Image (spheres, helix red, strand yellow):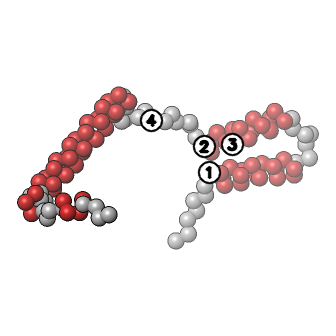
C-alpha cells in the first residue's frame, strides 16, 4: 500500500517551490522583499501549526541533601553487611592455636 503522507518540511519546500515558480512566470512588477518574507512566514506558520509549550515535569525534584543522606545510609548498611559477612567467615574458619605446628624452631638462626 502506497502512502500519500508527506512530511511537513517536504510539504513546506514544495509550497515554496510552487510559489517561487509562480512568481517567476508572472510578468508583473517585482514584489518587495517584505511581502515575500511575510508570505513565507505565513506558509511556515500554516505548516507547523500552533506552538505548544512543553509539559511541566511530573516528577518531584529531590533535594541534594536528601540524596546524599539516602546514599550514605545505603552505603553504611552495605558496609555493615560486608563486615558481618567477613566476621562470620572468620569465625567459621577459625583455626585453633593447638592445631598449629610449633614454629619456634624457624626463628633460630644458624650461624
* Cα–Cα gap, marks 2 and 3: 9 Å
Which residue occupies 78% across, 37% down? 37
Which residue occupies 62% across, 45% down? 47
**Tag on residue 8?**
1
Question: Is 6 above or below relative to 56?
Answer: below
The quarter in which the C terminus is drawn is: bottom left
Name which of mark 3 and mark 1 comes first in the sequence.
1
Q: Position of residue 61 (x, y in %)?
A: 37, 31
Pointer 3 local density, CA inside 10 Å: few below 14, some 14–19, many at least 20: some
- Tag in front: 3 or 4: 4
Judging by the rendered image, the residue that carries numbered circle 2 is: 48
95 vs 82, left or right, is left
Name which of mark 3 and mark 4 comes first in the sequence.
3
4 vs 13, left or right, is left
* Cα–Cα gap, marks 4 and 1: 23 Å
Judging by the rendered image, the residue that carries numbered circle 4 is: 55
Classify mark 1: helix, strand or loop. helix
Name which of mark 2 and mark 4 comes first in the sequence.
2
* Cα–Cα gap, marks 3 and 4: 26 Å
Please state which of residues 5 and 91 is positioned toward the viewer in this rendering: 91
Classify mark 3: helix, strand or loop. helix
Q: Image quarter for residue 34?
A: top right
Q: Are marks 1 and 2 in contact (CB under 8 Å)?
A: yes
Residue 60 showing in the rendered view: no
Q: Position of residue 73 (x, y in %)?
A: 26, 36
Q: Are marks 4 and 1 in contact (CB under 8 Å)?
A: no
65 vs 9, left or right, is left
Question: Is 38 above or below relative to 81?
Answer: above
- Tag in front: 4 or 1: 4
Residue lying farthest to the bottom in this orientation? 1
Judging by the rendered image, the residue that carries numbered circle 3 is: 43
Amino acid at each position: 500500500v502506497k502512502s500519500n503522507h508527506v512530511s511537513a518540511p517536504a510539504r513546506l519546500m514544495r509550497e515554496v517551490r510552487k510559489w517561487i515558480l509562480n512568481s517567476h512566470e508572472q510578468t508583473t512588477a517585482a514584489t518587495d522583499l517584505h511581502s515575500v518574507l511575510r508570505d513565507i512566514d505565513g506558509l511556515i506558520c500554516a505548516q507547523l501549526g500552533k506552538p505548544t509549550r512543553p509539559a511541566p515535569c511530573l516528577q518531584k525534584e529531590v533535594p541534594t541533601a536528601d540524596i546524599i543522606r539516602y546514599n550514605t545510609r545505603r552505603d553504611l548498611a552495605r558496609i555493615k553487611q560486608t563486615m558481618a559477612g567477613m566476621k562470620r567467615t572468620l569465625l567459621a574458619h577459625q583455626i585453633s592455636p593447638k592445631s598449629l605446628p610449633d614454629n619456634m624452631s624457624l626463628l633460630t638462626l644458624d650461624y
